[in-house]
Amino acid sequence: MYAIIADGGRQYRLEKGMEFKLDRLEQKPGSKITLSDVLLVANGDSVKVGAPKVAGASVEVEVISEVKDKKTIAFTYRRRKANSKRKRGHRQRHTLVKVTDIKG
């Protein structure tokens, strides 16, 4: 059984027991969250497709921890101009979660 959910402008294909990263949710480790933006639920040959969401379907996840992504460097400059450089770094924060149940 698997489900496709939408979160933060992205779509994820999830199965029970799977770990994945969501945008930061500011939740404590061990807390449970219900994701209700389910676009598709499939169980063997039966597939339910939403328009745009599947009615009554949800995915329950458990928060494992809060993690940081790899550092991204943004470097800009203007060629042939003296002292015209700028270098910035950014590390995006994510919430690492584990799928505990898919209801469809």
Image (spheres, rainbow, N blue to C red):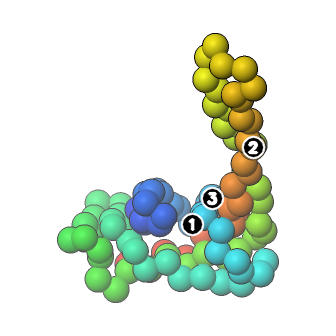
The mark lying in front, picked from 1 and 3, is 3
The mark lying in front, picked from 1 and 2, is 2
Q: Residue 16 carries which label?
A: 1
> In the image, what residue type sits under mark 1?
Lys
Residue 67 location (% of width, % of height): 77, 60
Q: Which element is circle 2 on?
A: strand
Q: Which element is circle 1 on?
A: loop
> In the image, what residue type sits under mark 3?
Phe
Q: Distance between the residues labelled 1 and 3?
A: 11 Å
Residue 10 location (% of width, % of height): 45, 57
> In the image, what residue type sits under mark 2?
Gly
Which residue in the protein does label 3 denote? 20
Q: From the viewer's perspective, tell me whether residue 43 is left or right of residue 76.
A: left
Considering the image in quadrants, where does the C terminus appear? bottom left
Q: From the viewer's perspective, tell me whether residue 63 is left or right of residue 53.
A: right
Which residue is more in the foreground, 80 or 90? 80
The mark lying in front, picked from 2 and 3, is 2
Considering the image in quadrants, where does the N terminus appear? bottom left
Q: Residue 41 carries which label?
A: none
Q: How far apart are marks 1 and 2 (CA)?
A: 35 Å
Which residue is more in the foreground, 80 or 10? 80
Q: Residue 89 carries which label?
A: 2
- Residue at position x 71%, y 80% in the image: 27
Residue 50 location (% of width, % of height): 25, 71
Q: Which element is circle 3 on?
A: strand
Residue 39, picture quadrant: bottom left
User: Disc count in the image?
Assistant: 3
Using the image, determine if residue 58 lies above or below residue 99: below
- Residue at position x 60%, y 64% in the image: 23
- Residue at position x 71%, y 60% in the image: 93
